[in-house]
Image (cartoon, coloured by chain):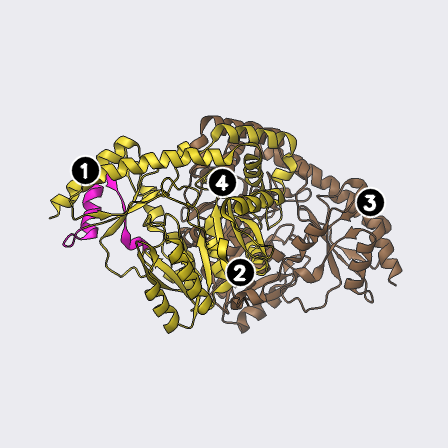
Chain colours: A yellow, B brown
Amino acid sequence: MNYNFSEKLRVMKPSAIREIFKSLGTPGSISFAAGNPSPESFPISDIKRLTDDILTNQPVTALQYGVTEGYTELRELVSRRLKTVYGIGSCDDDTIIVTGGQQGIELTCKVFCSEGDIVVCENPSFIGALNAFRSLGARLMGVPLCENGIDTAALEKILSENERVKLLYTIPSFQNPSGITSTLENRRAVYELARRYDIIIIEDNPYGDLRFTGEDVPTYKSFDSDGRVVYCGSFSKILSAGIRIGTLTANKEIVSKIVVAKQVEDVHTNVFFQMVTAKFIKECDLEKHILKIRELYRHKATVMLEALDRYMPKDVSYTRPEGGIFLWCTLPEGIRLSDFVSLAAEKNVFVVPGTAFLPDESEPTRSFRLNYSMPSDSEIDKGIRLLAETVSELR
Amino acid sequence: MNYNFSEKLRVMKPSAIREIFKSLGTPGSISFAAGNPSPESFPISDIKRLTDDILTNQPVTALQYGVTEGYTELRELVSRRLKTVYGIGSCDDDTIIVTGGQQGIELTCKVFCSEGDIVVCENPSFIGALNAFRSLGARLMGVPLCENGIDTAALEKILSENERVKLLYTIPSFQNPSGITSTLENRRAVYELARRYDIIIIEDNPYGDLRFTGEDVPTYKSFDSDGRVVYCGSFSKILSAGIRIGTLTANKEIVSKIVVAKQVEDVHTNVFFQMVTAKFIKECDLEKHILKIRELYRHKATVMLEALDRYMPKDVSYTRPEGGIFLWCTLPEGIRLSDFVSLAAEKNVFVVPGTAFLPDESEPTRSFRLNYSMPSDSEIDKGIRLLAETVSELR
């Protein structure tokens, strides 16, 4: 039969990154395209021990249906940690467990955006979030990202000219894909604009724990006196990505709506790994484990930046992230991004073209994303050298 | 601040069942309200052994991001089993892993229904599916369920009068909540109507493996020559509900759209339990395990039916399911369902009022759902006796 799909599906495309991810793995290839945490960041032996403990002592709880809000003990432990580490959470707020950070973002848009409402996104931004907003019939408007964070003049222009803006989506720390961290001053200015134009901020902070240099910047949620910030957290980069455990913290009224929306998507997040995560926080030293991951990524980022400094022509620019797992590289004028990405792929080096991260994908860009959490030190060195050669060959 | 939620959220309510589920657990209470499998159905020691094996030998695969379609080996094993056991799957079909059967149902509606499109549902039907359709802006129309299955005359009337019907949602075996199994003749007649009016059928079959009496009836998908059936399966009732592993089988073109829609919801289903499930199918005897569960539920259903036969006044009617975990009970005229449910709750016996399962919740009903997989034999006997007393007291 001929299938007649819904209107929304017609605008949705597979994520470029996940498609690249599938085509990887040819021997000898070097990938800077992933968004994966380093496998070295998984505390395998602890997880194994906790798993055994849970299946010995609480197997039925772990394998039976749970409640949509999440495993109570984990919710409490996460709330406490967010309060202690980030100053997040008032008595009007609630924290629930979601199926990865992705679900928190998608659900927040679902409860706030009707067809045609506008979500303002950093330009560039996380493709998974952009696609989620598109899938819900929201319109995307990009606001440029500067060295200090969101371009507030551009943001004000968008807000003043568009009545239907409902949400601002931001990754304020070690942004995906740019690696940029916005300053406190910038965050306060953005919050003031959100207040003036009465919009909600989705603060997506999956990399927040992964600072390896510089000083922590307070989260939006920590100074959210209005209850207009929905804070999305994740255990993907500090415990395991495959277990799909994310968190969401927001005003109770918002959370109650999100719970209803989550119920129809997957009933609840898998209980077993909520219990593993709770046990890990309680019985192991999460903060110490995070310090180890920070050291690992500090090293990887240093190796990549040194290779870029050594090999890249002076007119190739790149960000110098203070944490996270990505940096953002921009080609000189005169080189076409698509030519560069293709030629690099011929040399078996894979990057994600910046186009994938644009709210408006028809916009021209000469930037691409580099990931340093997955490749080995020698792959980083060799891969960056090959990318530099690619630039020279395209002059 | 005052929150301005999306249009869709305004029509969504928390699932009555999951709300009841939360309020349960007071000591001495007897619940027939759950939809949970019996904890005895979880193969705990096998899961523990497989878990240990996976975390010893393939920990990185289990804890890293996976692909949206699901763990390849599990997809192959599920396809093979569906082919062998149910004759499901042609060369044009594809099978993917989803986060519980719920996600498969929700995603199918998402890819087919635009705002205002109609989903025809059995009346009564599974509340999680009804709420998912509502959340996507679809309109629900109920078609009565008779002893042999869907009332085909009523279905034809709906299809001939409503151009915007896109989907028929059916649970043909051991239906939730009614316990009814439709006959092959009924299924063929419904399929012919779907063909004539060119609509898609969602065949939801989470209880299909749990037949404890009578002969198997072929699934819709097994005679789906047009590729108009989306088959949703689940491991919740045969392995574990908390692990959130469901399956979806449909024409490749449909599946490719569903994969794109799934990507924005949760990226992929938790990898670890996809591996556990694959290993269970490969190394343990799933079919033998299922036979044990069937025996368990045959016993439970018998205990409940005997109690109903013994205690209930003759003018209370109920279905006699051939499998699954539910039966459907109807009060005599003159007794108000809400009075009955409240008085039963005062006696610490909980049932789900039929209202929750109606596509149009304003419709009157005197029916309620009884679950027999969770309560113990003595709880079933005592609970049914108390429900019978409740009927008498309300005369």
Q: CA distance from mark 2 to mark 4?
A: 29 Å
Answer whether residue A350 is magenta in the image: yes
Residue B340 part of the magenta-drawn span = no
Q: Earlier in the sequence, mark 2 or mark 1?
A: 2
Residue that badge 3 annotates: B381
Report the residue marked by disc 1.
A310
- Left or right of B23? Residue B99 is left
Disc 4 crowd rating (10 Å Cα; few below 14, some 14-19, many 20+) is many
Residue type, mark 4 in image: Ile
What's the amino acid at mark 1? Arg
Does the CB distance between marks 2 and 1 fall below 8 Å?
no
Q: CA–CA distance between discs 3 and 4?
A: 41 Å
Span highlighted in magenta in the image: A332-357
Sort mark 3 into few (<14), some (14-19) or many (20+) by Cα contacts within 10 Å.
Answer: some
| Callout in the foreground (3, 2) | 2
Q: Which residue is mark 2?
A: A227
Residue B290 appears left or right of B319: left
Q: Earlier in the sequence, mark 2 or mark 4?
A: 2
Q: Is residue B40 left or right of residue A347?
A: right
Look at 28% across and 32% down and name the residue there. A377
- Report, in whole angstroms, how far the alpha carbon at label 2 lies from the one at label 1: 47 Å
Q: Say which element carries label 3.
A: helix
Q: How many neighbours does mark 2 have within 10 angstroms: few (below 14), some (14-19), or many (20 or more)?
A: many
Q: Is residue A129 visible?
A: yes
Kindly indicate whether the residues beneath marks 3 and 4 are on one polypeptide chain.
no
- Report helix, strand or loop for mark 2: loop
What residue is shown at x 83% (from left), y 59% (from top)?
A: B315
Report the residue marked by disc 4.
A243
